[in-house]
Image (tube, rainbow, N blue to C red):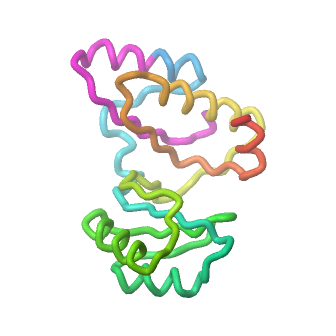
Amino acid sequence: PGGVAILVQVLTDNRNRTVADVRSIITKHGGNLAAAGAVAWMFHKRGLITVERAGVDEDRVMEVALEGGAEDVREAGDLLEIITAPEQFDKVKEALDRAKVPVDSAEVTMLPQSTVAISGKQAEQMVRLLEALEDHDDVQSVSSNMDIAAEELERLSA
């Protein structure tokens, strides 16, 4: 919906059943299932560590993260997002732990190279689609390149 790309990673013992299930979920929510690997080029594997901005010295967090090998530190609302190469993820996480930086979340994930802004009905469709995909037993992770305003995402997720 809305020209948004979704990358779904699954682990299954029955490929045909899982493909049929995922296709059904996507179609039911107004999307189309592309061929395997068709949107993978739109994402890159990166470490993503988030830190709540409240109560931390942002300059210190940035210094520790970059010295530890992070590629980028950016503001995202109430959070600082620390981006790392997958092979530097543990090193950066350990540097933050040693510096007693309170980490909110830390994972290696697929980040979009660019995003597509959506709102209104398209945003509602996308949130429902992503929730339905994440609820499937064989789905390990779901990544998308959607960009929804934080207030709207909060309203839709309630």
Location of residue 118 with respect to 103 vertically, above or below: above
Q: Which residues are magenta?
A: 1-23
Closer to us: 54 or 49: 54
Please name the residue shown 34% across and 19% down the image. 19
Say which quadrant the C terminus sits in.
top right
Location of residue 105 with respect to 157 vertically, above or below: below
Residue 123: x percent and y percent? 69, 38
Please name the residue shown 43% across and 80% down the image. 99
Location of residue 30 with respect to 78 vertically, above or below: above
Residue 134: x percent and y percent? 48, 30
Say which quadrant the N terminus sits in.
top right
Location of residue 80 with respect to 126 vertically, above or below: below
- Report if residue 51 lies within the magenta region: no
Query: In screen coordinates, is 104 left or right of 21?
Result: right
Please name the residue shown 49% across and 41% down the image. 5
Residue 97: x percent and y percent? 40, 72
Query: In screen coordinates, is 121 left or right of 38?
Result: right
Closer to us: 119 or 51: 51
Please name the residue shown 73% across and 52% down the image. 149
Residue 22: x percent and y percent? 42, 21
Q: Quadrant of residue 12?
A: top left
| Residue farthest left in this picture | 13
